[in-house]
Amino acid sequence: MNARILKLKEEILDAEGKWGLERARLYTQAERANETEVAEVKRARALAHYLDNKTVIIKEGELIVGNYGSGRGIYEIYPEYSFQDSVIRYIHFDCEQEVNDSFFETQQEKREFNEIRNYWRGKTMRERVDTVFPEYVVKLRDLDICCNPYGRDEGQGHVAVNYELVVRQGLRSVIERAKKRMEEVFDHDPIAYTFNKAAVIALEAVIRYAHRFAQEAERQWAAEKDEKRRAELKSIAANMRRVPEYPAGDFWQGCQAVWFIHQVMHMEQNGFSISIGRFDQYIYPLFKKDVLDGGRFTDDFAFEILQCFYLKFSEITIGGIKISLTQTVTICGRDAGGNDMTNELSHRCMDASMSCRVLNPQTLVRWHRNLDPAMVRKVIEAVRGGETHAAFFNDEVVVPALEKYGVKPQDALQYAQCGCNETEIPGKMIGGGMPRPLFLLRVVELALFGGVWRYTGEQVGPKTRSLAECDTFEEFLESYRTQYNHFIKYISYATNMMDYLHSQYTPLPFASALMDGCIERGRDMLVETEYFYYTLGCNDFIAAVNNLAAVKKAVFDDRSVEASQLMDAIENNWSGYEHLQKTMLATPKFGNDDDGVDHLVPVVEKISAEAISGLRSFRNNSPWFCECIPRISHVYEGIVTRATPEGRNDKDTLPPGISAQIGTDLSGSTALLNSISKLNPEHFAGGVISNIRFHPNLLKDDESITKIMALVNAYMKKGGMHLQMNCVTRETLLDAMENPSKHKDLMVRVSGYIDYFTNLDRASQADIIARTEQTF
Amino acid sequence: MGERADILKIQRFSINDGPGIRTTVFLKGCPLRCAWCHNPDSMYREWQLVLAHRLCTHCSACVPACEAGVHSVSEGAHTVDFAACTLCGKCVEACPRSALSISGRSASVEQIIELALRDADYYRESGGGITLSGGEPTMQHEFVEALFTEAHRVGISTALDTSGHCRREAFVRLLTHTDHLLFDLKIMDPELHRQYTGADNMLIHNNFKCAIDRGADITVRHIVVPGVNDTPAENEALAAFMLGCGFRGSLSLLPYHAMALSKYEDIGMVYRLSEVIAPADAYMKELDEFFNRAGIRCRIN
């Protein structure tokens, strides 16, 4: 890595996080000045006021400019959404901590913060939601059963706008369209007129904001001694006079335009999982012209531009400095004829991701059977190198699933990933935005206790037969289904209501202007978009499957365990029931290709799929998808969940997404992937996460990598939807020495063969750890 | 069909036991007693009680469960009278920590084929299949033959991981069912071979020649054990022998490691090589170069 990139990276990683007031101050000023305006215009003016006055920084050596906040590591406040401490929330899932004046050092800052806070009291999205939601829905949310609307504290996020439009046509052309539309609808469509007026205000402001960077570059140029840097600053100034207002003239300007729009996306709202779509496709013509054919930029310089571009994503500090905001770059994929769309830029993107090795952005590779094998190999090598979030998504599964839900074939082919693997279509689709999960383990718990909340004794769900009252497993499954179906209505209510509140109070005129058709329709994207979809998050899916299977085997099939005894045991965290725990732990677990448990995968899935088939939505009457994307909810859900029948202890982590419970997939990677393949991805068009982890020495030579490539290809050909591979770190191995039961599935390569790490004695483990350090 | 074997374990997703992704079945029982054996519970075909000392909390739950009085726990030490064990399994059931287990189970051809077929997609993609390892799989050669015949019938490729210490007649018959042979050559000097493995290497060498003459696809595996077979004389003899037989396959060098030490304790056996330390990476590289120079395709595994 060259000195420039290294320095920029260190600056980002070494930043100390701290709260800032700039955005809150400027947004409050704008809000006060525009109180009588309609929401769209108010929001556009606030963004404009912010962009006209916010701090503009060009860092030494930067090639791509546009700073997110007011300085290094500053957390901006989004008062229109909430004052909750997003940093704490993203890390610890503690939603109750509010930012207060103690977060600021000087008396002046404290005073200013308090003024701002007081002004917004009663006007934040959080407070609006809390006012609107009925008591029972609030209870379900507080108990973490469902209706936990992420949108309470933040914006929609989860979108990739039409970046290609920005690169190829520029904002000026969008403004012209919006102005024309204003004239057309002036006399009869006040909503469309107002929306377009807001869009023009926002887009003009973004252009002025770009020009502020041109001025700053010119200022630095005048003072700069170094000839090389002077030339760069001159180019930066020229870039900022041109993009994003006009079409990008070269590769550098293309990257610059994308970044500029992407950072403003994060200024208009604090939603996460805002992604840049199929970057390697829409930038490729410029890359080909300027780097491959023209020689306008050397390959090395083009790569520096790309690295600078990649590093910028980590500047966005919503949620903290070192939190992945799941901003995703999607690369590769196939066209309508099944041809591979991988190009030289796709490879350079993966190279940039590997060399920068920062949490943001994550790179997602669209797999299909003609995918360039060199790309598959590159991803696996990246995994070996410690890249923790390179992942594959399967075109052959995702495209048909989208088509099934009514997406036009040519649009389905353009899908990209947003965030933790939600499927979106850049410029055309939003959805899964504020996923409202139903925590399936909660449903199991309620079924076990007949609808009574085991933590308080309240009857929270409908009264159904408890485990002890069921004579057959089918009866128990019926209790589960009844509980499940009961909550669906409330999830649908919360979802639709949340979308309505956002469209009323926090419309997104800037982002909307860059979504296809919003200008013509004259409606904010939160109201109308080409495609919406809603997701029912099936969090804890595998935990539910494992628990149902454990109960089925021990209580009903073998009749070796009394239901009442099992209930006592889990209420006492197995204390005094160690033997019973051993029995329950020995029941089949998902991830071992064991039909004794895997046969319940389609059963549990069907209950979810049937439940959502009857759901409606007020936006386009759009479909609902299931998804299983836990982010890290499986960790915090685990912490608050008491012991469960499959043998789990109080507080233990739950299995993430469609992955095995840690330490229970003991039959090798093929068995794990076979288990995962039993899920019907058509039901999970919203996305799933499946994780598989390796020790880096499993990938130590070309031959091993070739075998892992075959593993990936075979799994995908079988219809796997997603695959994320991880290499374990030294910390994990150290933890595995101390807590072997949590890492029983961790495979390592001992010279010449693979063994489970926890099977080795301590000395051998220490040896492996020592070797791991060499590998990294 | 109908053949059953005594096995140690079945390992899916084996990527170091022959071409591609494989399912490896470890059969119990071996005629050799290699001092560095890393699966000591595979030496005997008889099933055995195993106490994983690292998991034992000395709770004594096993003591009353055993009618034969195999277990005694005192002052933080759990001792096992392995000879007295009748393999009734009661202590295994009683142990809350799963520290006790029985090494050995019976598996049929059908069971193994059924399991292997589950990974057929991965075999196809990677050129993999079933590997029989051990122990010494040829000790249960009737089973091997039955399994490999059935594997071929259902389109699964076969590999045999053997020391070559096997009667010629049976060995030859197995060759006709084996797509890939993993052949372990341990020590060239006959006397040293006897000393460290308990058997002469004449039969092994003859079988090796025989396999080459019959055109078998062979990978030689050679564990480099410092102080035992890492002398220049041994290395030269190994290279000369392989070349002399007309060997054209590849050689896989495996550095010795002492990671099996605790496995010996767990079944009440004594590990003879506790003083030996793993060969240095530099030496392995040197050796790799030596064999490659000699004209043998070699890699460190």
Image (cartoon, rainbow, N blue to C red):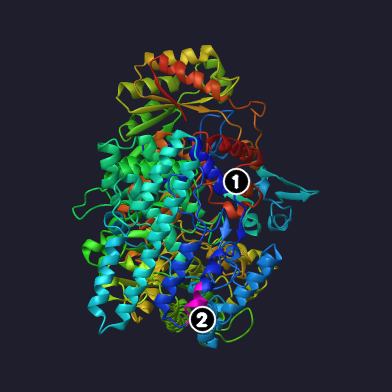
Disc 1 marks a residue whose amino acid type is Leu
Q: Position of residue A728 (x, y in %)?
A: 53, 46
Along the viewing direction, whichever of A43 and B96 lies nearer the viewer:
A43
Residue corresponding to mark 1: A733
Which residue is nearer to you in this view: A292 or A268?
Answer: A268
Q: Nearer the viewer, mark 1 or mark 2?
A: 2
Q: Going 30% across and 78% down the picture, which residue do you hit? A: A193
Q: Chain of mark 2?
A: A
- Report if residue A643 is visible in the image: yes
* Residue A129 disc label: 2
Q: Is residue B13 visible?
A: no
Q: Determine the main secondary structure of the stretch shown in magenta.
A: helix
A262 or B287, which is in the foreground?
A262
Q: Secondary structure at mark 1?
A: helix
Residue A264: give x, y in percent of width and height.
43, 61
Residues drawn in magenta: A30-35
Q: Amino acid at mark 2?
A: Val
In percent of width and height, residue A263 lies at: 44, 58
